[in-house]
Amino acid sequence: MPLDPQAKEMLELTANANLPPTNTLSPAQARYNSRLRKPMEGPHEIKATDILVRGKDGLLTARTYTPQGVGPFPVLIWFHGGGWVVGDLDGTDGTARELAAYANCLVVSIDYRLAPETKFPGPVEDCYEATAWIADNADKINGDSERIAVGGASAGGNLAAAVSLMARDRGEPFIIFQLLVYPVTDRNVATESYQNNAEGYGLTRDTMDWYWNHYLRDDGDATNPYAAPLQAKDLSLLPAAMVIAAEFDPLCTEAELYANAMEAAGVPTEYICYDGMIHGFFGMTPTIDKAKLAMEDACSSLREVFDNKS
């Protein structure tokens, strides 16, 4: 399929901003530029409240998004993208609001520590500890501890996949579903989608190299499944999953490989690659029709899983 015209328009708008490539910047400069992009807005009727949750080495800020109605609500713990280096609660606010409204669940967005100040495994251990704390304290935020899912986009999808592996390996908390939106699953920039989409579609191969170099302590970490879930030798007994990918995304191949590997290990897995789409499209529902469709598909899957566990 050709590049979707709406996605092409978004790429042109980004190019017209004349911002330097992320991989040529310092982390601080990249974070500053990231905040220049106006985040999408979500449903205003969703109540948002900042709370403190447990991290690996101290307290973290998290933001709860409560849908209308009476709880306790099922819980989606959400990890933002940004290559483990950029991104924050404000940047993913609109997406979190939509997920809460349309999946009718409590969304808890986690402000985990960023690299390179906190390298692997710090960020993923933060996300695991926050997930465990939420499971233990779900009643305090009007959540249902028996219906907990994790999810995230890009690096956030990587963290959600890794938290699912950690929870299985450590025996807790109990997670029923993982929503992985164009997840980073391996440090392999020689895949077919990296070759086809290395430049010109937003996220580039050079920027992903830059992200990985800031996140990992050394090359040995690239074989650790908590950093690169596709490296896991055993993917059995993981929560059911939905994996969303974009055709013109360097990460498309590794998302599909991870979905296939989970399916082969007996994990109920739904994989959807959206034709003509680019990395980041899931957060562009106001301007891209297929982003609206992907959000509808994700929320429909979440509702089905939560309803089956009620």
Image (cartoon, rainbow, N blue to C red):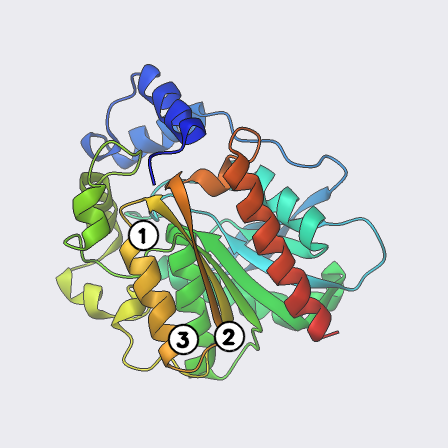
Q: From this view, report whether residue 187 is shown above or below residue 260.
A: above
* Quadrant where the N terminus is found in the figure: top left
Q: Nearer the viewer, residue 125 or 185?
A: 185
Q: In terms of sequence position, does the residue under pointer 1 or pointer 3 come before the other?
A: 1
Q: Amino acid at mark 2?
A: Pro
Give the residue type that dot 3 points to.
Glu
Tell me whether the residue at label 1 lies in contact with that at label 2, contact meaning CB atoms closer than 8 angstroms: no
Residue identified by numbered label 1: 252
> How far across and how far down the image is residue 245, in percent?
40, 52
How packed mark 3 is, by other alpha carbons closer than 10 Å (few <14, some 14-19, many 20 or more), is some
Task: Give the residue number, with chain letter if any, for mark 2.
Answer: 239
Q: Earlier in the sequence, mark 3 or mark 2?
A: 2
Residue 47: quadrant of the picture = top right
Label disc, if present, on residue 263 of the rendered structure:
3
From mark 1 to mark 2, how far is it between C-alphas?
21 Å
SS at badge 3:
helix
- In the image, residue 3 lies at what x, y percent? 34, 34
